[in-house]
Image (cartoon, grey):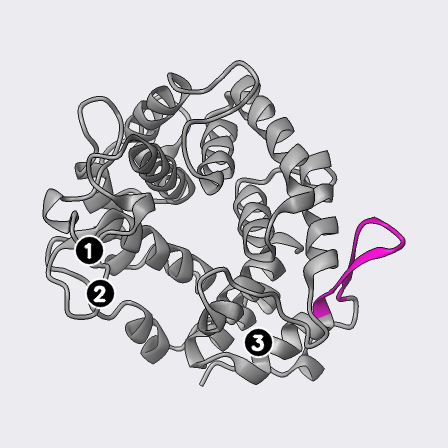
Amino acid sequence: MGGVTSAELPRRNRVCAGSVSAVVDLDAAIGFVVAHGDAVERARLSRLRTGAPTPPELLDMAEAGQSPDGGWPATLDGDIASVDATCFRLAELDDLGALGRPAARKALDWLAARQLADGGWEEDESLAGVAPSWARPGDPEARFFLTANAGYWLAVAGRDARAGGPLDSRVGGAYAGVVHGAAEALAGQLGPDGSWPSYLPAGWLSAAVFHGQHRYDESARILVALASRLPGMSAADAAWLAATLRRVDLDGTHPTMLAAHRRLAETQRSDGGWESDDGHQFDVHTTLAAIRGCR
């Protein structure tokens, strides 16, 4: 079923988080996912730790429910694709090494086609009654967050994808022009002190977009702001931040990454997992993000 036991993994699984007293126990984290994860989550763990290929039937399971236009709805019975839900699904598929498969490529092309004239993204107006606050159509904070999230996944996947057409001279691969537009839209709202007019996760997603575009000034300003907020972050936010920034190859010794590792060490539970902000049913997802961020 694509699972893995901790006995099969290398024993060098303790990652220092910047000081002797702050250590993330990856052995315990792996054990938590093995004990509590479903088949897809265990396959994600196996891929993250050993690069093991994911069985086709699990990839099919992870891709289920895709709308004909390429995105994924926010609910199982939904018929309108959601930018937010599609980005969440791409994160799962990324852990499975599936961003190059037809389902993800179709979703990425759908995201690219959904970009607005000003470079941003917004949910379909028909989702206004069901969208969470961070994705509500017409809300400027939601618009900034969705722009950072969609721009991030197009930047990550665009380096290898070819579905979007010929590469151009800008950084970012097949979706270079789209990501460039997203970066411009985000930069136009960034404060001189690195602040951003949206939810906390929009900060690290924006920093990752800028980093991938080699816009290091904007990225650095946000990273300084994030480092100052890390001591009070939830476990889920620290894990998401670390996973996002490592995915765009921010060095693990960067001060913001070290601060994230310290926060993860402080918030890791005795059972090896980390608590999700969205309910315990997502604790395994948060723990997988922490493992990705501490690789």
> Which numbered marker is on residue 75?
2
First in sequence: mark 2 or mark 3? 3
Task: Give the residue at x 52% y 63%.
Answer: 276
Quadrant, the N terminus: bottom left
Instruction: Answer few, some or many: residues within 10 Å of disc 2's Cα (few below 14, many 20 plus, some between 14 and 19).
Output: few
Residue range highlighted in magenta: 13-26
Amino acid of disc 2: Thr
Query: Which residue is drawn at the image coordinates 35% and 19% (left, top)?
Result: 184
Does the CB distance between marks 2 and 1 fall below 8 Å? yes
x then y, percent, for residue 217: 56, 17
Q: Which residue is identified by label 3?
A: 33
Q: Viewer-proximal residue, 171 or 274? A: 274
Above/below status of 254 relative to 56: above
Q: Nearer the viewer, mark 1 or mark 3?
A: 1
Judging by the rendered image, the residue that carries numbered circle 1 is 130
Query: Which residue does the image show at 23% across and 51% down from the upper left?
Result: 131
